[in-house]
Image (cartoon, helix red, strand yellow):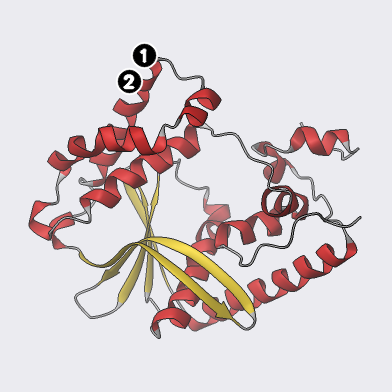
Amino acid sequence: MTFERPLPASLSPSRLQDFQSCPRKFQHASIDRIPQPATKATALGRFVHYVLEQVFKLDNAQRGDHQVGAYLNDAVANILTDDVRTDLGLTEVTTSSFVAEGERIAKNYFTMEDATARQVEGVEQRLNVEIDGVPLVGILDRLDREDDGSLTIVDYKTGRLPNVNYLSSTFANTELYAAMCEAALGETPKQIRLLYVGAGEAIERPVTEVVVGARRKAAVNAWSSINNYYAEGGFPARPSANSCRFCAYKPLCRASGVAVPG
C-alpha cells in the first residue's frame, strides 16, 4: 500500500502519544486525516482552556474569577462551532447547561492558586523545535516563572484525577514539552504542575535530566518507527482495553478485521 498523503511535517506530543498507544490510530488521525467527532470532554476542555487563556492575558491585578463571565460568549463562538454542536447534539437548553458547567470549572481554577501572583512567561506558547532529528511542535497552556527564577510548565486538565498507576503516562506529554522548552528556550523547566480544575486539585512533579533524556529517546524511537511504517505502507493496530475505549476509529478497525475489545 502507498499512502496518498505525506507524513506530517512535525510531531506533537499528543500525536506521539497516539502512536505509542496505537500506531493505527496515528495513521488514521495524522496521515489519513480522518476527522474525529467532538466529544463533550474534548469540547469542555477546549472551552475552559480558552477562557483561562483570555484571563491570563490580562495584567496580574485584573485576574480573577469575576473575569470569567466576560469571555463566555467568545468561548461559545470560538469553541462551539456548528460542527461541534452537531457532534454533541446540542440544543438551546443543553448549550446553556454546557456553558454553565464550563463557567463553573473555569471559576474553580481560582480556588486553587492566586492568579494575581503568578508570573507568566507564556500563555498558549507555541514551540517548534527539532530534537535529535525529530521535528516537534506543540502549544503550552502556560509557562510560569517562579520566585527562585525557575520555570514551571502548567497544564490545565478538566477531566478526572488520574489513577496513581497511570501517573507516568499522565505526565508523558508535559515531560516531552520540558525537552522542547530546553531546545527552544535554552532553559529546562524545573517543575510540571497539572491543574485538575474540575476537581480543584493539582499534581506536581519535578523535571529531571533523566526524565528529559528518556522523553527525547522515546520521541526519536517513535519518529523512526513512524517513518518505517510509512515506507512499508501500513501502521499496525495495537488493540487494548485502554487504547480502544474512547477511540473514534473502532468501526474502521472492526471493518478491517481487527479484534477490538468491548
Asked if residue 121 is positioned above or below residue 34 in the image, the reply reads: below
Query: How many circles with numbers are drawn on the protein?
Result: 2
What's the amino acid at mark 2?
Ser
Q: Residue at x 12, y 59 (%)?
A: 60
Please report contact status of discs 2 and 1: CB closer than 8 Å, yes or no.
Answer: yes
The quadrant of the image that shows the N terminus is bottom right
Q: Counting other residues with Cα less than 10 Å from the Cα at mark 2, is it few (<14), some (14-19), or many (20 or more)?
A: few
> Residue 34 sits in which quadrant?
top right
Q: Residue at x 77, y 51 (%)?
A: 24
Q: Residue at x 45, y 20 (%)?
A: 90
What's the amino acid at mark 1?
Val
Q: Counting other residues with Cα less than 10 Å from the Cα at mark 1, is it few (<14), some (14-19), or many (20 or more)?
A: few
Residue position marked by numbered label 2 in the rendering: 96
> Residue 152 sits in which quadrant?
bottom left
Looking at the rendered structure, which numbered label has been put on residue 93? 1
Q: Is residue 150 left or right of residue 220?
A: left
Local SS, label 1:
helix
Looking at the rendered structure, which numbered label has been put on residue 13? none
Asked if residue 23 is positioned above or below residue 69 in the image, the reply reads: below
Local SS, label 2:
helix
Q: Is residue 143 left or right of residue 127?
A: left
The quadrant of the image that shows the C terminus is top right
Q: CA distance from mark 2 to mark 1?
A: 5 Å
Q: Residue at x 75, y 53 (%)?
A: 27
